[in-house]
Image (tube, grey):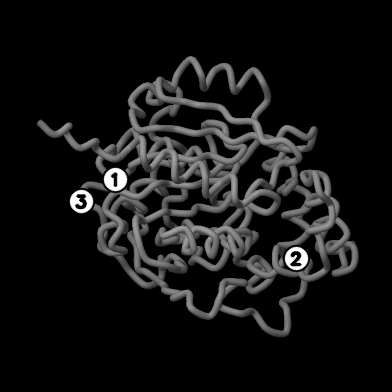
Amino acid sequence: MTPFALLALAAAAPPPATAPESFGFPPAARVLRVPSSRAPLSVPPPPASDDAALRVAVLGEGPPVLLLPGLFGSAFGYRTLAPELAAAGFRAIALEPLGVGGSARPEGADYSLAAQAARIAALLPALGAERPVVVVHSAAAAIAFRLAARHPERVAAIVSMEGGAPEQAATAGFRRALTFAPLIRLLGGRRLIRRQVRSTLLGGAADKRWVTDEVVDGYMGAAAQDLGAALRGYRRMANAREPEPLAPRLRDVRCPVRLLMGAVPHRGGPDEAEITRLRQSLPTLVVQRLAGVGHYIYEEDPHAVVAAVREVTDAALPRAAPGP
C-alpha cells in the first residue's frame, strides 16, 4: 500500500466489530501466537517472550512453505494462496513479522530487517520448518534475502513476488508521510480511508474484480484492531537501523531464487534498474513475468505461485544418484 493509505488507516480507521483470528484462512488452519525475542541480534539475545509474539497460521501437510506478507500488509493476502499450496501437498506457514498484521508491536524491540530475519530463523525449528521455501511479497523480500545470506541452512529457496532488495523497511516517502499522521487523524474518516485503500489495491491490480468490499475490509482489518499500536509500529520500522547493508551480502544467497513480476503495467514492485542489479548480484536468480497480472500476484494468479514453489523445490532437493 502507499504510505498515505497506511498512515490514514492507522491514524483514523475505527476497529471492526469483529476481527477473526483466522484472517480469512479456512477453518482447518491452525492459528498460533509464537513467542519471539525482542532483540535477536544481541549477544546473547534475550529469551523469547509473549510480548513479542508473532501471529502464525499453518495449513496443510508436506514440505514447508513459509509465507511472509509485505511489511505493511498482513497474512490476509494469502487467504487464497495458502489453501492452494495445501492442496498441492505443501504445508503453508503464514507468518507475520514483528509489527506486521496481528503480531506484537513491543516498545524497545529491534525492528530492523536483519532482526526480523534472525527472529524468523530462530523460530523455524519450533514450527517444524527447518528449511522451507520462503515466499514473500514486495519489501519482505529483503527479510528473505537476509535470512538466506545469514542463515543459508534455513532457506531451501526463495519465491519473491514483486520484491526487490531494499536496504530499509520504510521508504523515504513513508517516513515523510509519518509527519502527516496527526493531520490524517483530524481529517480522516472511515469512508475516506476505505476509498484510499481501495484505490491503492486497484492501482496495483490487473484484474480489478477481486477488489471487493470484503477484500478491502480484510486488508484494513489487521491494522484497525489497535490503531495506535499500528502507527507506533510503523514508526519503529521506519526508524530502525540496519547493522549492515544488504547489497554486499546478496552474493551469499546461494539457494534458488525466483522473482515473479506482473507483466501488466501497475504501481509497485522493483523497476528495471533494480531488477538488473538483482541479476548481477544473485547468481541463482530467475525472473519470470506473468501475463495478465499486476502487483498482487498472490491474489491474481496463485496457481503461478504454486507452480514456482514446485519448481524451486525440485531445484533445491538433492538429486538421487543414478542406479548402476
Sort mark 2 into few (<14), some (14-19) or many (20+) by Cα contacts within 10 Å.
Answer: some
Q: Secondary structure at mark 2?
A: helix
Please state if 179 lies on the left or on the right of 324 as rendered: right
Kindly identify the residue that appears in the image at 46 percent across and 68 percent down: 57
Q: Is residue 97 above or below residue 324?
A: below
Q: CA distance from mark 3 to mark 1?
A: 20 Å
**Mark 3 lies on residue:** 44
Of 275 and 249, nearer the camera is 275
Q: Secondary structure at mark 1?
A: helix
Among the two numbered marks 3 and 1 on one chain, the one whose residue lies closer to the N terminus = 3
Sort mark 3 into few (<14), some (14-19) or many (20+) by Cα contacts within 10 Å.
Answer: few
Q: CA distance from mark 3 to mark 2?
A: 42 Å
Among the two numbered marks 2 and 1 on one chain, the one whose residue lies closer to the N terminus = 1
Q: CA distance from mark 2 to mark 1?
A: 33 Å
Residue flagged by tag 3: what amino acid is it?
Answer: Pro
Residue 208 pos. (x, y %): 84, 52
* Quarter of the rendering occupied by the C terminus: top left
The circle on residue 154 is 1
**Mark 2 lies on residue:** 215
Residue 87 pos. (x, y %): 49, 63
Kindly identify the residue that appears in the image at 47 percent across and 63 percent down: 86
Residue flagged by tag 2: what amino acid is it?
Answer: Val
Of 53 and 258, nearer the camera is 258
Please state if 135 lies on the left or on the right of 274 as rendered: left
* Residue 102, quarter of picture: bottom right
Residue flagged by tag 1: what amino acid is it?
Answer: Arg
Give the farthest residue toward the left. 324
Nearer mark to the viewer, of 3 and 1? 1
Residue 183 appears anywhere in the view: no
